[in-house]
Each structure stands twice: as C-alpha cells, then as structure tokens.
Amino acid sequence: MRRTGIVILLILLALGSAWAALALRAAKPVIDGPRSAAGRVPTIEPDYREVVIPPNIAPLHFRLIEEIDVWSAEVSGEQGPGRVLHGRTPEVCIPRAIWRDLLNTSAGGTIRLAFSGRQVDGAWVEYEPFTVRVAREPVDPYLVYRIIDPVFGCWGHMSIRQRDLSSFDETAILRNRTFEYDCTNCHSFCQRDPGRMSLQIRSQDIGACMVVADEGQASRVYTATEFNRSAASYSRWHPNGRVIAFAAIQVMQFFHAVGHTRDVFDQASDLALYLVDKNMVTTTPAISDPDWMETYPEWSPDGARLYFCRARQKPVEEFASVKYDLVRIAYDAQTNTWGELQTLLAADDIGLSVTHPRVSPDGRYLLFTMCDYGNFSIYRPSSDLYLLNLETGERRLLPINSDRAESYHCWSANGRWIVFSSKRRDGLFTHPYLSYFDPQGNAHRPFILPQEDPGFYDGHLKVFNVPEFVTGPVTVSPYRLSQAVTEPGFRKQATLDPQVAARDAGAARDMPWHSVREVPGHQP
C-alpha cells in the first residue's frame, strides 16, 4: 500500500512539473530592455528553417545557437490564434498539443516562427522570422531502420527498429542480443506492408539465412543452393507478395593504408528469385551471368519489370575501375518467364557507378545513387542521389545532395516523400533525412528525422541504416522473429528449380549451404 502511495505521489509530481513547464513556455516574458533588429534569422540546430514537412510529423525540436540567455517566440499557423512561447535554455520544444494544432490548421500553408532573445548585456535582439511549410500529403506513419555501430569489421548490439513518425515512439522489431549478437541486415517489405517483411541473418551458430515474415507467420529460409552458394542479400519483394528477388554475393571488405580507409568489393554476384509458396530458388542467365556481377534488384510497381545494377566481372586489383550499369528485364510472375535485357544507363557513357534503384509508386521515376566506383555507395563520399524520368529518359542530379555521401533511399506510398541516408552532418554517422517530392517532380530541402531531445544527434553514436517506410507497425512480434531465428522448427531449406542447372561456384561463399550446421531430427 505504501509503495502504491509513493508511485501515485511520483506521478502527481511528474504531472505537476509538466504543467509547470507548459505554463512557463506559454507565458510571455517581459522584454525589459532595448531591442534591436538582428537583420537575420536565428541559427538553429537541427536546421529546420524553410523546409517542407508532412502534416503528420512529430514536433520539430531544435536548439538556438545564439548568445542569449532568454528567448521569446511567436509561433503561428495559417489559421487560428498565434502562440507565444519562451524559455531560459537554448532548447526549443513546442508542446505536442500546440504542434498538432499548428499542423492541423496549416496543411498546404506555413508555420511562422519569430524569435527574440536577451543577450548577456541585457539588451534584446529581434531576429527575422522564418517559416516551415506544411504539405497537404502525409508521410507513411512508420519508418523502419537498423541501428548499428559505425565500425569496420565487428559489432556488438544491433537492432531493427521502427519509429512512429507522428511521435517520438520507437520500438524494437528484432534485437541481435536474442541470437548471440550476430548480424541482422537488409530488411525489406512488400510494398511497405508491415505484414510482409524479410531480413537477412549472418550467424556463426545458425549460418546465413533469410527470415521471412508473411502475414503473422515467420520462417528461417536457407536460400543457398547448388547454383548459388551464397545466401540472400538485398532482397526485394515482388508486388504479388509471393516472389522475393535477392542477390547472392561473395563480398570482400578491405582497407586502404592511405586516404579513405575502408572499401567493399563483390568478388561474385548473381540475382535469383525465391518463390515463397514453392520454397524454391530460381533464376535465368540474364540476371545471373558469370561474366557479370548483378546486384540491387528492384521491382516496378506493377511487377512487370525487374530493375538491377550490373558490372563486368573483374579481379579485386581493379576495384577502382568497377562501375555498375542500370538495367531492367521484363518478368511474368504468372508463368515465371523473362524478356530481353535492356540497359537504361551505361557506366561507360556516364563515367559513374549506379546503385540502389528505386521506382516511384506511380512508375514515372526511378531514384538512384551514383558514385565514382563500386556498389557500396555509403562508403563513397562522391555518392549523390539522381532521378531518372522513365517516360522521357531525362536524368538529373537532385538538389538535395550534400558534399558527403547520400546513399540508401525509399519512396513513401503516395510518392510525395523520400527518405534517404546521408552522412552530411559529420561525415561519419549515417542519419535519415526526409524530402518532399512535389507533383512536378521537384525534391525540396531535406530535414533530419526529428527527435525529442534537440541534442540527440550529438550524443547518439550509432548509425541509422536502410530506412524503409511502412504503412503501419510491423505485425509480427519480436518474440516470433526471435523464434524464427533461433528455434529448429522454423528452419526451411529452399530447393533449386529443376530447370536451373547446378553450377560450380568455386570457393565457399559466406556460410555455404552444404556446411550449415544440421539440426538433429530435421531434414536440410
């Protein structure tokens, strides 16, 4: 009983503190000294000035990077009365209820913020106001990403996480601490469906496999066969939800003694399909030619074409000359038949290497990355985002790039938002940025994923990896995913399509299919 009373008292104290903080922010401080015009807008971090945001985004919390000890702000939307907030620390955190009102009354318009601050000598300075534009189109409600240390060849804690973009709520989908801290990566969804996802596991204990979650069910699939000795990487779901394209890669990571430290090279790479209902791996020579390295599959929204990148097979000594083309091939999912290969962008013509093709939901555009060489663009400071108009063939560099690496990216379901990975903030840590993509095909000034703590990115020494929009919270539970990874009953060995000839793949790649540790009582 005594413990219950203490808990109630603590809750009341917390509520009282919250109301006191809200009252403090809502009250207008007395401007008790001379006031002069700064002639500029205030410097803030993160810099959300003049960006376009969704009408369902979490509050934009930031810090004032100014030499002031008190600030006052008039915040107003398109409709309704303005609000006056103030604070005695650099942090500007608009209460959620006020923020929600601002968004609701400003969709299609702007939010205006006008700051004044008291300097150390007691004089007040008035800054020029700045605005934040609110789009009418919402962003998908959830973002899924991997959190990992920015290390070279080892890791500790790693997790796949989901963030509610309308708030600061973040939950784990799968933590690697549940399976001996092994690697989990390359998560993918079927058209942003939280009920259908796949991810890859690399484990010394259970081997290399692909976890497939399909409408509440989950399994651990070993996709390496007599044709593809490597397990699945970079998986992409066909829109029908019954086919998963993947790359089978023999990857090498190495380090330079001078200049940029680390590098990645694919010694071999093929594409194949996993047929979910048949538990079968199939392929065709056009996407698995031994003279070429094929990678990064991506389906068109109607599933009629498979886009991917490919480069001529070369020895590792020539790594800096490897550049990938952008190609596509027709595919009929009903008959599992293929068309002719078509090159859309040839590396020899453009002088750069293409990676990460992603087609917009309306099929009009293809967003992709290009860098000076190779296919691991997150390691290349030269990596930039480009847009290809699939109707006209026009290619252009997007204005949302920085002088540092821009890499992995994803479209929202309505095609109005792009999320992409960028190292622009410090050159080391990868963070997710969002950009509004308007109906005219223009990408607007991006903004970093908002966090509750305005100083979050200064102290969060982790990398955000592979951001993917989803239309809701992932439906399969972390417990069920952990079961699929660790328990024998969830293990499935894919078979090879009888129409595909076995191939001598040479040296074992990663965790070869024939050396996966057998589980007593279960057939491989």
Image (cartoon, helix red, strand yellow):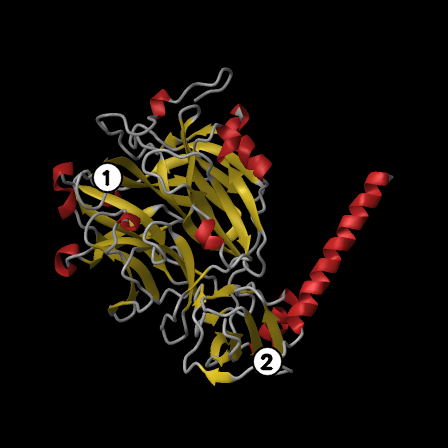
Q: Residue at x 33, y 32 (%)?
A: 498
Q: Residue at x 41, y 75 (%)?
A: 439
| For residue 20, side relative to residue 309 (left or right) | right
| For residue 400, side relative to residue 17 (left or right) | left
Q: 303 or 489, which is in the foreground? A: 489
- The residue that disc 1 covers is 266
- Whole-percent x, y for residue 154 in the image: 36, 33
To which quarter of the image does residue 22 belong? bottom right
- Whole-percent x, y for residue 333 in the image: 39, 49
For badge 2, the amino acid type reads Ile
- Whole-percent x, y for residue 456 in the image: 49, 54
- The residue that disc 2 covers is 31
Q: Residue at x 28, y 50 (%)?
A: 377
Which quadrant does the C terminus fall into? top left
Contact, CB < 8 Å: mark 2 with mark 1? no
Rendered view: 81 above or below 86: below
Q: Secondary structure at mark 1?
A: strand
- Residue lying at the far front of the rendered structure: 121
Rendered view: 52 above or below 450: below
Camera-nearest label, 2 or 1: 2
- Mark pair 2, 1: CA separation: 63 Å
Question: First in sequence: mark 2 or mark 1?
Answer: 2
- Whole-percent x, y for residue 102 in the image: 60, 74
Q: Residues within 10 Å of mark 2 (few under 14, many from 20)?
A: some
Residue 239 in view in this figure: no
Q: Residues within 10 Å of mark 1 (few under 14, many from 20)?
A: many
For badge 1, the amino acid type reads Asp
Q: 180 or 271, which is in the foreground? A: 180
Q: Residue at x 76, y 54 (%)?
A: 13
